[in-house]
Amino acid sequence: DARVTQTPRHKVTEMGQEVTMRCQPILGHNTVFWYRQTMMQGLELLAYFRNRAPLDDSGMPKDRFSAEMPDATLATLKIQPSEPRDSAVYFCASGLGGGYSTEAFFGQGTRLTVV
Amino acid sequence: RKEVEQDPGPFNVPEGATVAFNCTYSNSASQSFFWYRQDCRKEPKLLMSVYSSGNEDGRFTAQLNRASQYISLLIRDSKLSDSATYLCVAEKDDKIIFGKGTRLHILP
């Protein structure tokens, strides 16, 4: 059963520390999304990639966040330095973009708490 | 202004009733539309796509009005298991934007 895998599932860190979240998209999917979900803002699109190239990262605070796809099986979202306001659930999703079905299949999320 | 806006609810509805949600989107160039469902502390999952002609999937009916830029979801004969948050989605060029969701509680 193909699924998007995210690690870690939970992360508690101190303010100022670096946080790296990882995502393994479904094999064969060419589009990868990073979302952040909070009660106040809902699901916010941070960045998305097609064929490993970033298409849009306008939703991401550039000074502390970075997103990359080192290869087709791994996407990373890094926060450095982390702040308490970054506490949220971070979802990775993948799909077949570029004119195919744009259904996004989500991972189970990384619940980040910055203290 | 958010690109996709929904009434956050909650909607508290007795079992067996019919409930409808609306959603508006601001980007008139949006190409595709969807409803996703999210259970508490779980990831969102696709419920159904929304087509201009309207479409039905069992007890669920989705409608799209491009002129007014709104999307609707109707749930008939609601079940306890329908309790969840329903997320409205607009997509353009693979950029998938979610509304904040409408919470639905089905009451026994």
Image: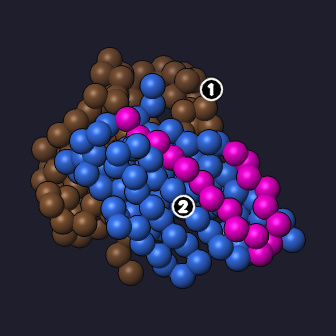
Chain colours: A brown, B blue
Q: Are discs 2 and 1 located on one and the same chain?
A: no
Give the SS element for disc 2: strand
For this rendering, which residue is in front, A18 or B20?
B20
Residue A60 higher or lower than B69, as above or below:
above
Q: Is residue A109 left or right of residue A72?
A: right
Q: Position of residue B4 (x, y in %)?
A: 44, 40
For this rendering, which residue is in front, B87 or A57?
B87
Residue at coordinates 62% horizontally, 42% vertically from top-left? B7
The magenta segment: B9-26
Q: Amino acid type of disc 2? A: Leu
Please state, as top left, top right, bottom left or bottom right, where the C terminus of chain A lies in the image.
top right
* Tag shown at residue B73: 2
Residue B30 higher or lower than A7, as above or below:
above
Q: Position of residue B13 (x, y in %)?
A: 79, 61
| Camera-side mark, 2 or 1 | 2
Q: Quadrant of residue B85?
A: bottom right
Q: Is residue A100 left or right of residue A32?
A: left
Chain letter of the residue carrying label 1 = A
Q: Position of residue A52 (x, y in %)?
A: 15, 49
Chain letter of the residue carrying label 2 = B
Please state, as top left, top right, bottom left or bottom right, where the N terminus of chain A lies in the image.
bottom left
Marks counted in the figure total 2
Please, what is the dominant secondary structure of the magenta stretch?
Answer: strand
Residue at coordinates 70% horizontally, 77% vertically from top-left? B77
Residue at coordinates 37% horizontally, 35% vertically from top-left? B26
Residue at coordinates 36% horizontally, 56% vertically from top-left? B33
> Which residue in the protein does label 1 denote?
A115
